[in-house]
Image: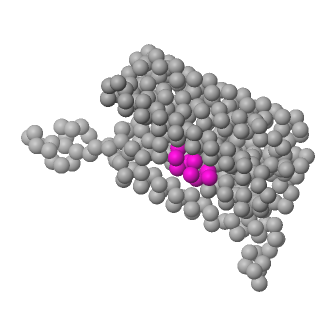
Amino acid sequence: MSEADLTMEGHSTGLTVGPAFSIPTKKLAMWLFIIADTMTFAACLVAYGFLRNGSLDWPRPFHSITNVALMTFVLLSSSLTMLFGLRSARAGDKAGAFRWTMLTAALGIVFALLHIREWLELIDQGMTLFKNPWGTGLFGASFFSITGLHLTHVTCGVIALIVVGVRYKGGRYNADDIEVLGLYWHFVDLVWMFVVPLVYLLNLGH
Amino acid sequence: MTTAEEHKSNGIKKDLAIYVCLLILAGLQFVIAYQNISASQMLTRMLAVAFIEAGLAALFFMHLWAEKRGFLLFVAIFTIAVLLGMQYGWTDSSRMVVGTPYSSTNK
């Protein structure tokens, strides 16, 4: 419905509807996506907790925290570079915003590579989706599905960062688009804060 | 220094402060993992730290604190309500180990 449809003889009828919560539409859409995605991850983690609590022989295959600590550091740092990218974009510094956005994407790639390296190590030790040498086979299914879902989000985020960064530099996107993408990237970081203790740290073999 | 530059500089300082807090909290989770406590205590402590981390990230990195209070309440209430709603089945997960209905384990 256009603005003209909502007015009569130049006077407002009072029916004009602004964006909900005075938030730009793209940003609101991203927030709604994030809320929905929170439910998806929460459902996966609750199901994981349910299985772990209900299994007597839950495996504890992790003996070193070095890799997961490094992954956490890289992902947290990528959130900071994303913020710097947004601040540069808001200040009109196009080159700076592009540089920070690409640095964020590079950190995302490092995170993904560390993640894949860890997966390969576990697969080498005999862990698959349905069996592992340490205990219940459900562990592999839950571990790979939760971390795989997160890794998918990181991969999509990296692609989006590169696309939005390049298009921002080319003048097709603006600072608002960087902000919307930043929300997604911070969310990926936020999810990791729950994956680390539940999936890794509680399964440390001391 | 102009007002805009000062504003940007203060913003970067705030971002760095939140980043350091998040790093410390993440490190705290690793420390908790090596404490000699029961699994349930460990889970409680780690989740408490994770929720603080998530709150800091959502409020300051995702700028939820700068949005209208109505939106903040909408996100918080809606998300927390659904997350709480997912917790109804925990007693049943214990039943899987015990092998009997939950009520009969308490008799």
Of the pair A4 and A165, the residue shown nearer to us: A165
Residue at left 46%, top 16%?
Answer: A95
Q: Nearer the viewer, residue A29 or A193?
A: A193
**B96 in the magenta segment:** no
Percent x, y of residue B34: 77, 51
Where residue A57 sits in the image (x, y, percent)?
86, 57
Residue at 55% x, 22% y: name it.
A102
The quadrant of the rendering that contains the N terminus of chain A is top left
Magenta-colored span: B49-57
- The image shows residue A205, relative to residue B38, as above or below, that is above
Q: Quadrant of residue A177?
A: top left
Residue A188 appears in view: no
Instruction: Please tell me which residue is depicted at 85% across the width and 50% down the height of the picture.
Output: A206
Examine the rendered structure and indicate whether residue A177 appears above or below residue A168.
below
Name, please, the residue furthest toward the left: A9
Counting from the top left corner in percent of width and height, residue B59 is at: 47, 46
Q: Residue at x 49, y 28 (%)?
A: A84
Q: Residue furthest right?
A: A133
Residue A75 vs A190, above or below: the answer is above
Residue furthest out toward the front: B1
Looking at the image, residue A160 sits to the left or right of residue A151; the answer is: left
Between A102 and B82, the one nearer to me in the picture = A102
